[in-house]
Amino acid sequence: MCTIVVLMDKTPRLREQACFALYTASRAVIGLYRPMLDKLGLTYPQFLVLMALWETDGLTVTALGDTLQLDSGTVSPLLKRLEAAGFVERRRGDGSGDERRVTVHLTEAGAALESRGCEVTQVVGGASGMSYEDLVALRDKLTEFTESIRTRETND
C-alpha cells in the first residue's frame, strides 16, 4: 500500500509519496549498519535473527519467522549461513518426540556477539541525530503503520 499525498490540481510527485520516504529511510538505515556488520561477518537480516535470539534463545523456526515477519523460505537460508559461521545451531525435536519441531539456539560465539551488537545499534541510533523520544515515536508510528497494513491484508 502506498499512501499518496495529492493536491487537487497536481500530479503526484515521487518525493510526496510516503512509500518512497519509507524505502529511502530503510536503505539509509541499512547502509549505516552495513560497514559495522561487515566487520562482524553479518548481513542485516542475519543480525536481526541474532537480535531475536538474544532476546529469546531457543525459538522454533516458525516462531523466529513470526518474530521477524519472514516466511520459512527466507528464514532457512539465513539460519544455514549463521550455522555455517558458528553463531547458531538448529536442534530437532523438543523432548516430546516430535522430530519435525526445530529450535534455534545461539552458540557461545553467537551469544558473545551480543555486546558488539548493542554497540552497533547505539551507533546507528546516534547517527540519526534524532532524540531518543523522537526515535521511539517514529518506531511506534511505523509499527502502527505496518500493523494497519497487515490487518488490511488479512481482511481482504
Image (tube, rainbow, N blue to C red):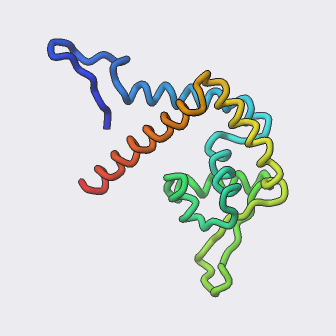
Q: Position of residue 37 (x, y in %)?
A: 73, 36
Can you say whether 14 is above or below 43 in the image? above
Can you say whether 47 is above or below 127 in the image? below
Residue under the image location 74 percent in, 42 percent down: 117
Q: Position of residue 70 (x, y in %)?
A: 51, 53
Q: Position of residue 91 (x, y in %)?
A: 70, 71
Residue under the image location 79 percent in, 41 percent down: 116
135 vs 111, left or right, is left
Can you say whether 15 is above or below 41 in the image? above
* Outermost residue toward the top in this view: 9
Q: Where is residue 90 in the image (x, y as percent from the top left)?
A: 70, 66
Residue under the image location 54 percent in, 52 percent down: 68
Residue under the image location 54 percent in, 28 percent down: 27
Quarter that holds the N terminus? top left
* Outermost residue toward the bottom in this view: 97
Residue placed most toward the observer, 142 or 79? 142
